[in-house]
Image: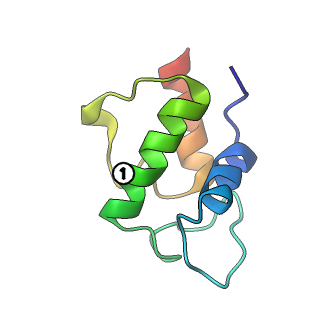
Amino acid sequence: MPAITPDSIIGLLLEHDILCSEEPVLPDSDLFTLGLDSLAMMQLLLHIERHFALSIPQAGITREHFMTPAKLAGWLGGCAG
């Protein structure tokens, strides 16, 4: 399984054109400010599950967990462990 890092989350966002923002996506960037909405969140979730071979618990799909690539990677690391 690939390592779950803020950079790997950013890679998925960019590779799959999930965000439409002119601003760079950094580990502490607010993804919602950059355009992440509920549909984009679900797209990202599907790519995360496929890429990292994870099954994300529905209860964990919160705005707080998806706020930044760093927060998301930290939470996903706990799901994978």
Give the x, y percent position of residue 62: 32, 48
Element assignment for label 1? helix
**Total marks drawn?**
1
- In the displayed structure, 9 sits above or below 53; it is below
Give the x, y percent position of residue 16: 60, 58
**Residue 75 visible in the shown view:** no
- In the displayed structure, 12 sits above or below 1; it is below
Quadrant where the image shows the N terminus: top right
Q: Which residue appears at 40% of the width and 56% of the height?
A: 41
- 80 or 52: nearer the eye? 52
Q: Which residue appears at 35% of the width and 55% of the height?
A: 63
Q: Which residue appears at 48% of the width and 32% of the height?
A: 49
Residue that badge 1 annotates:
42
Give the x, y percent position of residue 25: 68, 68
Amino acid on which the number 1 mark rests in the picture = Met
Specify how the rendered protein is coloured.
Answer: rainbow
Residue reaching furthest to the left: 59
Q: Which residue appears at 60% of the width and 53% of the height?
A: 69
Give the x, y percent position of residue 8: 71, 44
Quadrant where the image shows the C terminus: top right
**Residue 44 visible in the shown view:** yes
Quarter of the image holding residue 45?
top left
Answer with left or right where residue 47 lies relative to residue 37: right
- Estimate how packed mark 1 is, as few (under 14), some (14 to 19) or many (20 or more) residues with alpha carbons within 10 Å: some
- 51 or 8: nearer the eye? 51
Answer with left or right where residue 79 lies relative to residue 2: left
Residue reaching furthest to the top: 81
Answer with left or right where residue 58 lies relative to residue 35: left
Quarter of the image holding residue 15?
bottom right
